[in-house]
Image (cartoon, coloured by chain):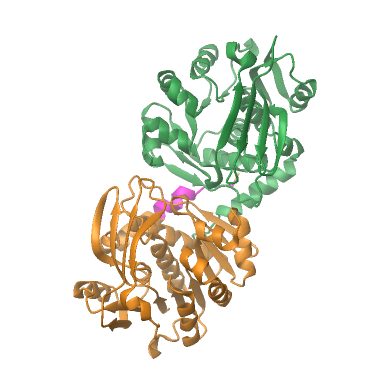
Chain colours: A green, B orange
Amino acid sequence: MSILVVGSVALDSVTTPFGEVKDVLGGSAIYASYAASFYSPVNLVGVVGKDFPEQYLALLKERKISLDGLQIEEGKTFRWSGYYEYDMNQAQSLCTELNVFSTFHPHIPEQYRSSQFVFLANIDPELQIEVLKQVKKPLLSILDTMNYWIHSKRQSLLKVISMVDLVLLNDNEARQLCNTPNLVKAAKTVLSYGPKIVIIKKGEHGSSMFTNSTVFSAPAYPLEMIYDPTGAGDAFAGGLIGHLAVSGDLSDNNIRRAVIAGSVMASFDVEDFSLNRLIRLTQEELYARYRAYRMLIHFDDQE
Amino acid sequence: MSILVVGSVALDSVTTPFGEVKDVLGGSAIYASYAASFYSPVNLVGVVGKDFPEQYLALLKERKISLDGLQIEEGKTFRWSGYYEYDMNQAQSLCTELNVFSTFHPHIPEQYRSSQFVFLANIDPELQIEVLKQVKKPLLSILDTMNYWIHSKRQSLLKVISMVDLVLLNDNEARQLCNTPNLVKAAKTVLSYGPKIVIIKKGEHGSSMFTNSTVFSAPAYPLEMIYDPTGAGDAFAGGLIGHLAVSGDLSDNNIRRAVIAGSVMASFDVEDFSLNRLIRLTQEELYARYRAYRMLIHFDDQE
């Protein structure tokens, strides 16, 4: 089934203890779209400047990511630069240049409006609301956000949270949004705002999915080397929505599988800078790691 | 099958954001023995002073914990005091009074020497070696330790690690012992020292078990309230060794089940101060949470 992804498209400059890159392809919508495209075609909505490199557009088109919704505006593309310390848990932002992103309003092309799976990647919650007003009610809407919006646009954020089916947050965002150190309490609070499902992403500690009646905890795939965590949360979201869209099955059990698909995708993302590892990724590698992941959490409880 | 537990017996004074207790029952051997006693009788070896309360001895005897190996010496019992900050991840030690523990040498009673499951709870690695010299080769020997011994008795610690089958470490200890922030690398390094299995405990983030050919990751049971994390690692060890001893099955799959039994036991331990929650714990509650835990990690991958 069709997937719509709306979010940021960026040129990132990132330094980690293992190297650095400058003005490379990034942004929440890019990581999510690229990851989802392993499962299903994707309709992308975002904005770039005239300086956005042709080769990046070509890269996205090769993956059957439709760019009809990518607005190309006069001016420079959104840029983010940051670095990670040795423990890699938290990005330190150095500079955020909004550029064409500062006046962005998502325009959803007519042919995208009945997309059945919608991912509102991290952007201003007011823009996320604009997206929901333009689309027909999808089978599943997923929302991501960041600490900046929790501070600065709390009311709009709470409103859009109440409008979607599934909310993705990382652990710190969940604590901050709900004003509690305890993630179980935080998840319950978010559920009380309206969504049916909350998934809390905990980086190297995996993720937990909460509904009003169930909890599912999935560890992260264990890796010996993490080169660059940028985009891991969005790659997770892309794997998740891709898995759900290809099957169209929203049962609790299939969402659990989708969480694993997301975890596996995120585990590849962090193995190189930018989208480099996902660009090299083959379907065979994806399946092989999914099987390895299954063994990671498998136990047989039949006595 | 029979279990031998050797470690500290203490009177703890603990403060957490949710309360405080003074001179309550604690110590690595106590938490582990009490937890294991839900599965199998336990032989305990440790030392206390003449001031050790009778009622604590009675409590242990009620659980079929044999105290023939508990040395009662002139002087005061080992005392530890510490506190936890709001995030509860790391105990802050305030005071450690060794008292009778400072001259302790474990004497393993003749009838304990063929115990088939041996848990060397956290004590001086030189004393752990003394224990191994006194017992017949068990079916499974498990070792725990702490950061203090990694600093101060590294060579003895590496020696005893090479002598046991299974090593338990928390995440910080593993990083410190192996001088790497990466837990997968740390686990491989520990395996290279000789043990067949390494389990890294990550507190609220669960645990991971590594062998030379497999990895198993188990999340922590999600709790809304954690009152006191003291003893959680030892309760985990007790649940683990108890589950293995009652079945006598050391297959990879059964060790995975034992990790879950340990996780479940630890989840009860933290629900109250000292051993209070374990003292109230019924077999029915234990089974119910084991089943709930199974659902926490369950997914059906048959298409």
The x and y percentages for residue B238 are: 40, 67
Q: Is residue B296 above or below residue B167?
A: above
- The image shows residue B215 at horizontal and vertical percentages of 59, 58
Does B273 appear in magenta? no
Question: Residue at the location (70% across, 9% down)?
Answer: A74
* Vertical order, A196 against B142 (above or below): above
- The answer, for residue A303, to whether it is visible in the render is no
- Picture residue at 50% right of the left edge, 75% below the top: B141
Q: Is residue A193 above or below residue B132?
A: above
B287, A74: nearer the viewer: A74
| Total count of labels | 0
* Residue B226 higher or lower than B38, as above or below: above
Q: Does residue B299 belong to the magenta stretch?
A: yes
**Residue A224 in the figure: left or right of residue B292:** right
Question: Quadrant of the image for the C terminus of chain B?
Answer: top right
The boundaries of the magenta stretch are B291-302
Q: Position of residue A75 (x, y in %)?
A: 69, 11
x, y percent for residue B260: 46, 59
Residue at 43 percent of width and 66 percent of height: B237
In the rendered view, does A164 fall on the left or right side of B185? left
Examine the image and state in which quarter residue A89 appears. top right
Residue B197 left/right relative to B145? right
Q: Quadrant of residue B280?
A: bottom left
Which one is in front, A261 or A253? A261
Who is closer to the viewer here, B32 or A20?
A: A20
Split into 4 quadrants, where in the image is the N terminus of chain B?
Answer: bottom left
Q: Is residue A19 left or right of residue A150?
A: right
Closer to us: A298 or B51: B51
Q: Is residue B211 visible from the viewing direction of this image?
A: yes
Outermost residue on the bottom side: it is B110
